[in-house]
Image: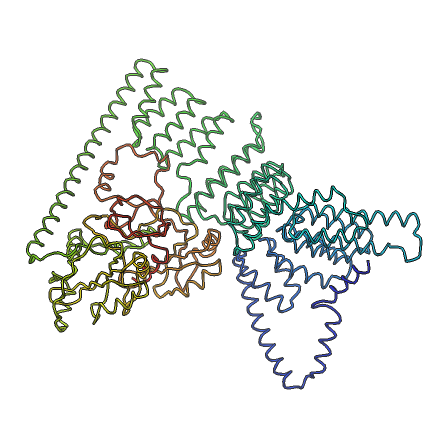
Amino acid sequence: MAAAEHGEKDRETQGLGGEEGEEEMESEEEERGDGSPEGTGQSSSDEEDEKENEAEIQRLEEQLSINAFDYNCHVDLIKLLRQEGELDRLRRARQKMSELFPLTEEIWLDWLKDEMKIAEDDSSREAVYELFEKAVKDYICPEIWLEYAQYSIGGMGEEGGIAKVRSIFERALTAVGLHMTKGSTIWDAYREFENAILGTIQPLPGTIPSAEQQQMLNTQLERIHTLFKRQLSVSLLDMGSTYAEYEEWSEEPISENVNQTYKKAIQQVEKYKPYEEALLAAETPKLAEYQAYIDFEMKEGDPARIQLIFERALAENCLVPDLWARYTQYLDRRLKMKELVLGAHDRAVRNCPWTVGLWKSYILALERHCVDHGTITETFEKALNAGFIQATDYVEIWQSYLDYLRRRVDFTKDSSKELEELRAAFVRALDYLKQEVEERFSESGDPSCSIMQNWARIEARHCNNMQKARELWDSIMTKGNSKFANMWLEYYNLERAHGDIQHCRKALHRAVQCTVDYPEHVCDVLLSLERIEGSLEEWDAAVLKTETRLSRVNEQRAKAAEKQAILARQEEEKAEQRKKSRAEKKAKKPKKAKTGDKRKAEDEDEDDEEWGEEAAEQPSKKHRGEEQSEDVEAEEMETETGLFGRSTSSTGQSESKQKLPATKEQPKIFHNPNKDNITVFVSNLPYSLSDPEQQLRNVFSGCGDISQVRVVFTNKGTFRGYCYVEFTEEKSALDALKMDRHELNGRPMYVSPCVDKNKNPNFKVFKYSTALEKHKLFVSGLPFTCTKEELEEVFKEHGTIKEIRLVTNRAGKPKGLAYVEYENEAQASQAVIKLDGTNFKDHTIQVAISNPPLRRQQDSQEASRSAMSMVPRQAYGARGKGRTQVALLPRSLHRQNTTGTTKTENGTPQTPEASSGAEGEPRKMSNADFARMLLRK
């Protein structure tokens, strides 16, 4: 008891608010005196600092009044208010933040310590207890539980105080007592508390305790024995010291049962040790290590340990939606404890409010545990305001809520309050998608009208109201769905089950007339209906209708096929003409022995490079013609000794105008194709290099030993701007590829594998992504004067930025576009919510998750698709292709890769290895390579 009181007194005298501390500050001020120059200067400086801080506090409060979900703004405001000692304002700021977000361990501990310092009477202590209760619900944190238990010791002198302390310690053991590395601190503190109580009831030396005193003494000793035994049965690190302490404390030998449980616990520690060591060695947030640990605990099957490892992982990865989803799913299916399950769901949506799946699971959990209707509706309204990043997310959350409302209705009654509420919710859902969602995303997210379909089915099946169902389906068809066979067949099935034959027949006749994707299927269904239900006249009418329709469809398909064939022949003729043109041009040039036919396989049109990542919001520029592109390509495929010059090129004319001194004819060096794997092609070099060979040797010397540098000259001896660098080892060539886009005399040089374009005409240095990249943002509408630093200053407030790329054209001029890559999808989602549509340097910027389009095929295939508009389309479903799937790649990038496809991320293959062989796959570029390429154009 004395030890406990002494510890509480120590805590009360620490930090701001203690009486001794205030007296010391006052005496110090008196010693300095008001008239001292130092004191005057310090006072003036303090006043300026206070004014600056107050201005910043007001700015932060104003910003939060505009956007209450700005997490970083909350943190900054709390830090400033704590620094200024504004206790009331600080308490309000913390309260507001805790209502919106779960607070971190650091924020909670600061808040709790500040409140403990000023808690004097019983009412203020109760307020601190309530604050502790909130803190332990946000995250399972051993430090907060330990602080809670130690603070409660200060109130043990009150009635029931000791029992309350023990209750808090037991709860702490349940929550974090199994924590391998930190759980022992709770056990040790609990035993110290019981030992302190034991010391207060020990009889004085030389006295004989009464029977009542002896009973109390024996009971207290048994408590401490029990605590030791319980701790030794739990797998914790450094259990040996606890065992040794028990041996020293106990007057009797340790029992065999305790020894056996202790040995089992030690064996379990050896199982857990590799995972704990991996966590200690890993860097934050250690997600992969925690995932492996969770998998191990799931196999072991101990619910308490599974819950604890999930909580430990979430404390460091609170913005990972998949981890929350896995945890809540486990709690829903295995533990099924209402308070625990709903608490976890609530924390999940507060941490990751942009994830619709977590909200759906939360609503289901609330319904599953019979929570009142008002709470579920309130939760749904919060979900609507959570700021989802896709239009389809709003459709999903509405559908979940409507499913819940439908399950509340008793359809045995003709009318009820619940049924009217369901119908009103359907109306509101349709209005919300049309107004709110379409205004933000330019689409409702529900092109197939799935919500309206469900409403129609409910009216038909449960309410026997086919008239209302038909009205709804009529509205569905007027929204562009009448051309899809599956929509007509859905309506037909509804009429077949709950309507009448006349409406079924009418629907199928309209379907035959309107369907454009699968008319044959609709015709078959109509004939099947008449075969079973129809009269002879109705059968004849159906046959005539279907034959007429199919005849017209076949005619249209034949015309489309003919048009496709014509386009294909035209493409072949153009290709043949280009081939003849190149052959004639080569025949006019003097014939000399070729030493190689190698060149860099660069992208044909770098000006449109950014289209590979995103369907850019800027209009595309006109590209060079096919023939011109092929002619330039033919010119570039010269011999390494510079046999031919570009007599018609502007570069050649500018070179001749400069009248550079003539150079001696270079010796002919024949290229050995067997050395392609140790050779790189370097282009885009400055023509003004005085000694290209020596300068390039200096540039690539760090990559390894260079066998030779083969510089390409014109027949007049002038440098053509590209060359070949041959190394002695393949590793050196691979290292040289990393020099791509390295600047030489202010100009980025292009370094690529040595590939024969005749053998690999479809070779490309890198490919483009067509997958949604949730950790990367596409930013448009930027001012052309925007710099990378300015953009980083804005976006870094919402997470850790890995890379920022400003998109430029070939001339290096900005296009007002950028890509911002975050560490994870949670940070990117937050940035979209906070920054989309905001003002940046007097420009309204658009921020969206990077969602690159699908690549189009070759021109002939694209033309055939447009010509074959009546051919049955692929089974995309009623929604067809989404808006973001439209391919907008430039024509020069339509070549198909013949060496297979590789999953990429914004131009970056995920396998970093490169192969520079002429017959192998193209070198795969890193993300940094692709970034440098974009930034330096």
Where residue 74 sits, quadrant-wise, is: bottom right
Count of numbered circles in the view: 0
Where residue 640 sits, quadrant-wise, is: bottom left
- Percent x, y for residue 793? 45, 64
Q: Nearer the viewer, residue 791 or 507?
A: 791
Q: How is the image coloured?
A: rainbow
Residue furthest toward the top?
A: 536
Instruction: Determine whether, in the image, residue 850 is placed left or right of residue 269.
Output: left
- Percent x, y for residue 670? 16, 58
Q: Nearer the viewer, residue 45 or 767?
A: 767
Where's the C terminus, which quadrant?
bottom left
- Percent x, y for residue 415? 56, 29
Q: Nearer the viewer, residue 599 or 40?
A: 599
Where's the N terminus, which quadrant?
bottom right
Residue in view at x 47 percent, y 32 percent: 455
- Percent x, y for residue 279? 55, 53
Q: Is 890 drawn above or below residue 415 in the view shown?
A: below
